[in-house]
Image: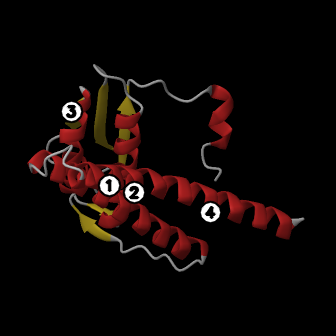
Amino acid sequence: EDLERAEGQRRSLMADVAHELRTPLSNIQGYLEAVHDGLLQPDTTTMDTIYQQVLHLTRLVEDLSLLALAEAGALTLSLQPDSLEDVLRRAVEPFRPRAEAKGVALSLEIPPRLPLVQMDRTRIAQVVANLVENAIVHTPEGGRVTVSAEMTAPESRAAARITVADTGEGLNPEDLPLVFER
């Protein structure tokens, strides 16, 4: 039963990966065909759109690599004292053009003088970027995505909570228990 369940999960993962990769690849192909056929000019806007799709593909492939490492028990964290404000700004700012283009307000609320926090800068930035991307996708025009941080422990321990909130449709209550299921 365990082997059958594992095989079913593997097939499901492969289908999910194929679906996630197909969309940006189809977008890139469509833009390149339109440029090739003379229907679209290879101007800055077109090239930027293609470039964003390539970046999206790169992130997906990196995510797959991280997933493989995590499942193999080989993913390690590089914990160091670091600036949470800097990590959040660098994770959120790249999404500002996409949010503006969609008509979604994107804001970052950080209290003044945040102390350094023991964290893996790369992993925190990745989680925040994934959450912001999902929030923008699922927030309608005129909506809002807010990323905030707050200290949750005395400065001597420097623990923090990061929140990504949006005015999107949210999850159905019956789906909440399944959020972390593949």
Q: Residues within 10 Å of mark 2 (few under 14, many from 20)?
A: some
Of the numbered discs 1 and 4, the one sitting upstream in the chain is: 4
Q: CA distance from mark 4 to mark 2?
A: 16 Å
Any mark on residue 79, and which?
none
Give yes or no for contact between labels 3 and 1 (Cβ–Cβ under 8 Å). no
Residue kind at label 3, given as amino acid type: Ala
Of the numbered discs 3 and 1, the one sitting upstream in the chain is: 1
Residue kind at label 2, given as amino acid type: Leu
Q: Which residue is mark 4?
A: 14
Q: Which residue is mark 2?
A: 25
Q: CA distance from mark 2 to mark 3?
A: 21 Å
Q: Which residue is mark 3?
A: 101
Task: Note whether residue 88 is visible.
Answer: no
Is 119 located above or below residue 172 in the figure? below
Of the numbered discs 4 and 2, the one sitting upstream in the chain is: 4
- Residue farthest to the front, as pictured: 37
The quadrant of the image that shows the N terminus is: bottom right
Q: Position of residue 101 (x, y in %)?
A: 21, 32
Q: Secondary structure at mark 1?
A: helix
Q: Nearer the viewer, residue 93 or 88?
A: 93
Of the numbered discs 2 and 3, the one sitting upstream in the chain is: 2
Q: CA distance from mark 1 to mark 2?
A: 5 Å
